[in-house]
Amino acid sequence: MLGEASMELTAGPRAVAHLAVPRELLPAGPKEFLVADADGLRALHFPAPDREIPYPSPEFYVEVAPGAVTVTARTLLRDLLLQADRPDPAACADRGLVTLLPGERVTIGVRGRQTPDPAAARAALSCMEPAG
């Protein structure tokens, strides 16, 4: 993290609020991006097209339990997706794309899967990777 700011923001129901980003927090190039967290919601802004962003090779830990796959990021995981139906056509995940910063974790619920398998879960995960 290169910088941080806490700002007040109010938006009424069905309204849009705009907030200026302090100049010192604007991304200086494709290696930097903005993260805005508010009331449990997150927005990310990447200043360049995906093909120009030098994404790191994804590194993460996977834990499985009946009905769940937990992923802990060691690097940025942009648009992480568990394709639960790849190892088991009857399985489905309870969420789609999620972006994790290093150290963050997400637990994805899985229905219809018979036996948790860490290797199969890892193989069914995908995210943005370095262009090559």
Image (tube, rainbow, N blue to C red):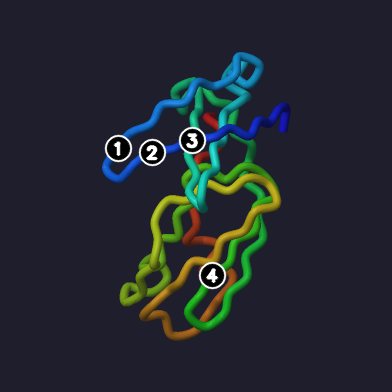
Amino acid type, label 4 = Val
Disc 2, disc 1: CB below 8 Å? yes
Question: What numbered label is drawn on residue 9?
Answer: 3
Disc 4 versus disc 2: distance between alpha carbons?
35 Å
Disc 3, disc 2: CB below 8 Å? yes
Q: Earlier in the sequence, mark 1 or mark 3?
A: 3
Disc 2 versus disc 1: distance between alpha carbons?
6 Å
Q: Earlier in the sequence, mark 3 or mark 4?
A: 3
Q: Which residue is mark 1?
A: 15
Amino acid type, label 1 = Ala
Q: Which residue is mark 2?
A: 11
Residue shown at 50%/21% (left/top)? 20
Disc 1, disc 4: CB below 8 Å? no
Q: Earlier in the sequence, mark 4 or mark 2?
A: 2
Disc 3, disc 4: CB below 8 Å? no
Say above or below: 92 vs 104: below
| Image quadrant where residue 64 sits | bottom right
